[in-house]
Each structure stands twice: as structure tokens, then as C-alpha cells.
Amino acid sequence: MRGAGIRTGITRNSPDSSLIDAYKLRWKRRRLLWRAFKKRRELRSVTDRTASIRPGDILCFATVRNEANRLPYYLRHYRDLGVAHFLIVDNASTDGTPGLLADQPDVSVWTTDASYRASRFGVDWLTWLQMRHGHGHWCLTADADELLLIPHHGSRDLRDLTGWLEDQGADAFAAIMLDLYPTERLSTATCPPDVPPQTVLTGFDAHGYTWEYQPKYRNISVRGGVRKRLYFTEKPDHAPHLHKTPLIRWNRRFAYLSSTHIALPRRLNAGLDARRNLPTGVLLHSKFLAQVVPRSAEEKHRAEHFTHSGRYDGYYDALAADPVLWGPESVRLRDWQQLVALGLMTCGGWDREDLPARHSCVCCDKIVK
């Protein structure tokens, strides 16, 4: 059940304290926006098709590096889900990623060889693009190894979802990142570029997730999954966060603070609060394809992916050893209904059978039964 195991940690703040906190966060947001404005100089346009963006289009933003193997299906998945245009920053790829993206008629591409970590893991670059092109649009921010599933996936799409959210006065949609993995060693999980990764990454941890309310940003922090089970049992607070707010009706004054885990203003972080009765989604995380084995040593050396990179040296070493992640806690992925039953996804008030669907996609047909 969603929210099971929540440690609230809620404290009563005085009105003066709340006003001070709000004031500090408002200035933090302004500093982030100014930072993104300055970081725009690090981007070089490869192909700019943003003039084709129309009012009401749903946009997708991403920073990528050497993802030519994942991107064909990534683009297909999100097109089927209702994305009209992609705005992608390529960070010094060497595998042909910029050319692959530039050939797509609905993709605008920028490139940079600047530090991923120094750009707040790509967030500064994307914030600038969202400021310039995302204002007034529903903007999805998803890495190349993240595929969003929503309730009623296959019969309703993001246009249906965002229309319903607007009717409810909501401007954000939350999701939990779900680590997928193969049944055998990681090196066996090879996947052609146009094939859904969940056909080879068939397993996930169904239980063992913790939910904790964090008053500072009014979000619910979620940790768990296979990475916490195998690599962070002794220091669970070092396990990666799994909560995200990937879909927001953007305003040029908005900013992500920590990847898509935390957004400002704080009201955008309430999507996992069950009291709001909003639907939530799951980001299928395909990190554990075969290429993670050789790339782990590279990423450990680059130290570009985590704020406290030294904490994750043992994690990278373990992945480079080509482990088997499947265990007694593992179950096979079936469909979005399974994720609802497990409490990892919720329909909220978007569960009425009489709600119209304007679009249909085939993504769910590809999930392993």
C-alpha cells in the first residue's frame, strides 16, 4: 500500500519560521534560475526545431551520453505516450548519439562537452531549455533509461492524464523509479535498440520500500529496490532516492533542485501524498542492461553521477563484476495493474471507467507476461 512505512518526521513550525523557510527557498529558486541562465553558454545547437512546437504540445527533456542503443525505443515509447517534441542535450557522446537524434523530425538537439556534475547533473542545461521553450507546456523530464508507465497505460496517454490533472487544479505528476534487472548475470541482458528493455529486464523487487515525509520540501522520500537490498543494507540512507516528479506544467519560474527528485516551488512535490487522491506513475529503470558492466568502471573513474561519488565506489565495483541481481524478493513484471496492486502506482481519482481516452498505444503489449 502506498505510504506504508512512512516515517512522518513532521514538526510544528511557527508561522514566522514557515515564512522564513519560504523566503529562503524562493531565493534558492532564483539562484538556480540565474545559474541555468549562465549555463546556457555551454550549449551549442546541433538541430533546433523548436519553432514547430505548438500551444498545448507535451514536451520531453533529457540529457544523454552514449545512449544510441536506448534512444530508438525511448523515442518510440514517448511518442506513443503523447510527447510531441523532444529537447535533448548530448553530453560529449562518442557513439553517434547526436547524429541519431538530429535525424529525428521531432527532436531538437544541443551538445556540450562541459562537466555533467558541474551542471548539477544536467539539470542546469535543461532548466534553461525549459525556461525558454517549456513555459505553459506540460514538460516531461526523463533519462534515456527511464520509461514512464501511467495508470490505464495502453488505453489512455499523457494528453488524457494532463487534461484530467488540469481539471483538478494539479500541475504536477509524481512517479517512483523501479529498477528492472535480468534473471541471470547482467552481461546476458542484451537488447536491440528498437526493442523494449523490459523484454530482457523482466525482474524487480516488489517489496522493501520505505516512504518518509520530508517537511523541508514537502515531499515523500522513497528508497528501496534491488540497489538498496544488495548494496546499501548497512547504510540505507545512502541508497538512491526513487521518488520523482517527472511531469510538470511548466512555468519559467520553476526549477528542479535535485534531479527530478525535488522541485521548487514546494507544492510541486506533493504528488505522492495519498491525501490528494492523485494518480501516480512508475518509471521503468533500464540501467541494468549488459552495457552497465563495462560502463561501471568508466563511471567510477569519471565520478560525474553522484553528489557524494566516493560513497558509490563499492557499488560500481560490484556492477563491474557482472553480478546476478535476481533473488528471493524478485518478481516478474507483468503490467501496470500489477504495479497498482503492489502499491507502487496509484490511479487516484483517475479511475473512472467513463473517462474518455483520446489515444491508444502498444507499450503495454510489450511488457513480459
Image (tube, helix red, strand yellow):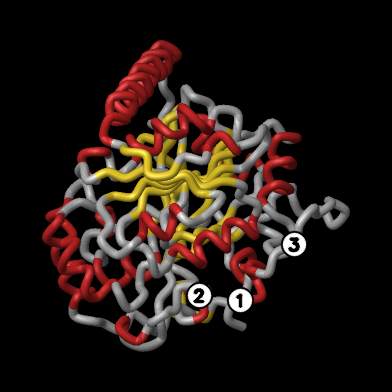
Vertical placement of residue 272 versus 178, above or below: above
Binning the other alpha carbons within 10 Å of mark 2 as few (below 14), some (14 to 19) or many (20 upward) gives: many
Helix, strand or loop for disc 2: helix
> Dot 3, crowdedness within 10 Å: few (<14), some or many (≥20)?
some
Label number found at residue 319: none
194 relative to 300 in the view: left or right: right
Q: Residues within 10 Å of mark 1 (few under 14, many from 20)?
A: some
Marks 2,3: beta carbons within 8 A: no
Mark found first going from the N terminus, 2 or 3:
2
- Give the number of the disc on residue 360: 3
Check contact, mark 2 vs mark 1: CB within 8 A: yes
Q: Earlier in the sequence, mark 3 or mark 1?
A: 3
Which residue is disc 1 drawn over? 366
The structure residue drawn at horizontal position 38% and vertical position 82%, both measured from the top left corner, is 189
Residue type at mark 2?
Gln
Residue 334, above or below 149: below
Please tell me the numbered disc located at residue 198. 2
111 vs 128, nearest the viewer: 111
Q: Residue at x 46, y 28 (%)?
A: 131
Q: Quadrant of residue 231?
A: bottom left
Between the C-alphas of marks 3 and 1, the distance is 14 Å
Q: Position of residue 99 (x, y in %)?
A: 38, 57
Lower sequence index among marks 2 and 1: 2
Of helix, strand and loop, which one carries label 3? Answer: loop
Q: Residue at point 42% right, 13% down?
A: 19
Secondary structure category for the residue under label 1:
helix
Q: Which mark's residue is nearer the viewer, 2 or 3?
A: 3
- Give me the C-alpha separation between circle 2 and circle 3: 20 Å
What kind of residue is marked 3? Ser
Three-letter residue code for mark 1: Lys
